[in-house]
Image: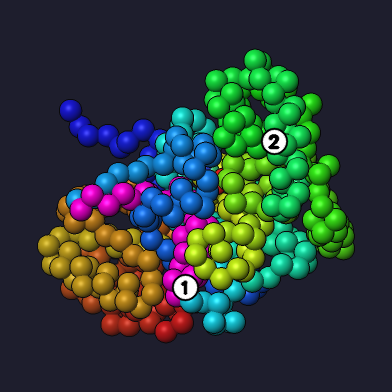
């Protein structure tokens, strides 16, 4: 039996790759306008990095990580997210000593053992943005604004922004108590997971996808009502700056995001077009993370965008090839094929996109192939034409053809296609 790919781990075939390249190039262009620099981080890290940063009692760490011992018995994990690795790299390379490096982005695959469905996969791709050592609310507003500018540039429709504040350790402590008191009163109605979460990490109850827990959570106390003065002021600042950029948002006190490291402002970009998996991207501030991972006590903020979800939301025509000139060289006869073979390479080196057949098919069959490949022009090389030192150039749209000399064929084609010589 043929071997198939792993469930939830997908191939990306050439017919959609144009969309991926579009997403990547728009991200690079816009992020660089906002002065972000690319960083590339490993796919495999020590398990401890994620357990310590994301939180031992989060769904990701408890249930979803691909973790295994390597041949030396070292416990490794395929990265489930990128922030922890970017922070680790920042600390490891002492980038805090290099003031020019504060704003990073990275793109690539992430791995979570979730139940696969539309918009949710076990290998998925994210674009991540991280900013370190800046805690002004203006920075949060700017990062959120950049996310929206990016989605707008890709013409992703009907995006709604939800924001919340997760406070700081000072406001979390009293809040945790009031949440614990509330949950104690309803503990017999909680699902098995939430019964456990109530004692280990009550905030994670807000992540529960079980309907009955969702209803209980609606009446639970929320962090937003327990913010300390500084966090309240900070959240107001973020909102004021968003207002000044004319960014519309909804305050969603139930949005806690699935990771323990968030502090203060968190946000999500939501779409009504993806069913249950409605978050296109999300992020927030994580001011204690760098210190918790053994680095300097510097604040951080950022977001992650799910690339598969973006691709699902893109217009059908987005990313379609825009190569306006595609040449197919049809050869008839052995001599012509030899000449065609070297000519094709020469034309490619000159910057044209060129293809030929190697199977010595009839002219009709080669024309059909040229058509399938969306060739705009076919250069027909037959033994008769070769003897004259010429070839026939057929314009596929206009259905016209003319003889051109082989002597200056490269210059001639480049000139016709208005390409630089
Ligand atoms: P998170 O890292 O959980 O905050 O997720 C950030 C974004 O990554 C989400 O808004 C999704 O767009 C995307 N994402 C997260 N998990 C998955 C998954 N299993 N499959 C596809 N996309 C995902």
Q: Residue at x 37, y 56 (%)?
A: 45
Instruction: Please provide percent x and percent y for residue 324.
Output: 49, 63
In percent of the image, x 59 and y 26: which residue is there?
Answer: 194
Q: Position of residue 362 (x, y in %)?
A: 22, 50
Q: Position of residue 282 (x, y in %)?
A: 64, 49
As for residue 75 lying within the magenta part, the answer is yes
Secondary element at image label 1: loop
**Which residue ends up furthest to the left in the rendered image?**
334
Give the left or right position of residue 60, taking residue 223 as reference.
left
Residue at the spot of label 2: 272
Q: Mark 2: few, some, or many residues within 10 Å (few <14, many ≥20)?
A: few
| The residue positioned farthest toward the top in the image shown | 188
Near mark 1 (Cα within 10 A), the count class, few <14, some 14-19 or many ≥20, is few
In the rendered view, tell whether residue 188 sits above or below residue 209: above
Q: Nearer the viewer, residue 288 or 13?
A: 288
Q: Tell me, yes or no, whether the highlighted magenta stretch contains residue 398.
A: no
Give coordinates of residue 325: x percent, y percent.
45, 65
User: Is 1 left or right of 192, judged from the image as shown?
Assistant: left
Q: Which mark is residue 275?
A: none
**Local SS, label 2:** loop
Residue of label 1: 417
Any part of residue 152 in sight: no
Marks 1 and 2: which is nearer the front?
Answer: 2
Q: What range of the chain is rendered magenta? A: 72-93
């Amino acid at each position: 039996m043929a071997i198939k790919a792993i469930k939830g781990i997908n191939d990306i075939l050439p017919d959609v790759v144009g969309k991926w390249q579009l997403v990547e190039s728009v991200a690079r262009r816009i992020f660089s306008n906002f002065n972000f620099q690319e960083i590339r981080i490993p796919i495999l890290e020590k398990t401890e990095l994620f357990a310590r940063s994301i939180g031992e009692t989060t769904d990701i760490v408890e249930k979803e990580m691909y973790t295994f011992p390597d041949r030396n018995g070292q416990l490794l994990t395929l990265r489930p997210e990128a922030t922890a690795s970017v922070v680790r790299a920042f600390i490891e390379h002492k980038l805090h000593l290099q003031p020019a490096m504060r704003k990073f982005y990275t793109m690539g695959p992430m791995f979570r053992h979730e139940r696969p469905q539309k918009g949710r996969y076990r290998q998925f791709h994210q674009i991540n943005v991280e900013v370190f050592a800046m805690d002004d609310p203006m920075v949060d507003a700017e990062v959120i604004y950049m996310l929206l500018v990016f989605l707008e540039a890709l013409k992703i429709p009907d995006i709604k922004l939800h924001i919340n504040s997760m406070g700081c350790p000072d406001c979390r402590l009293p809040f945790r108590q009031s949440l614990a008191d509330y949950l104690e009163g309803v503990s017999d109605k909680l699902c098995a997971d939430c019964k456990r979460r109530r004692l280990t990490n009550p905030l994670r109850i807000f992540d529960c996808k079980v309907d009955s827990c969702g209803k209980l959570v609606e009446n639970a106390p929320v962090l937003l009502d327990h913010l300390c003065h500084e966090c309240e002021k900070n959240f107001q600042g973020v909102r004021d700056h968003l207002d000044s950029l004319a960014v519309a948002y909804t305050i969603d006190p139930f949005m806690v995001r699935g990771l323990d490291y968030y502090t203060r402002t968190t946000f999500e970009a939501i779409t009504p077009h993806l069913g249950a998996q409605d978050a296109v991207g999300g992020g927030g501030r994580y001011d204690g993370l760098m210190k918790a991972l053994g680095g300097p006590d510097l604040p951080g903020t950022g977001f992650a965008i799910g690339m598969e979800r973006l691709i699902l939301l893109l217009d059908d025509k987005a990313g379609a090839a825009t190569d306006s000139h595609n040449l197919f060289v049809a050869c008839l006869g052995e001599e012509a094929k030899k000449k065609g073979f070297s000519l094709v390479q020469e034309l490619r080196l000159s910057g044209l996109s060129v293809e030929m057949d190697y199977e010595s098919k009839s002219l009709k069959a080669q024309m059909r192939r040229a058509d399938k490949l969306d060739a705009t022009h076919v250069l027909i090389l037959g033994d008769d034409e070769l003897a004259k030192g010429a070839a026939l150039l057929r314009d596929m749209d206009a259905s016209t053809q003319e003889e051109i000399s082989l002597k200056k064929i490269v210059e001639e084609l480049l000139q016709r296609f208005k390409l630089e010589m």
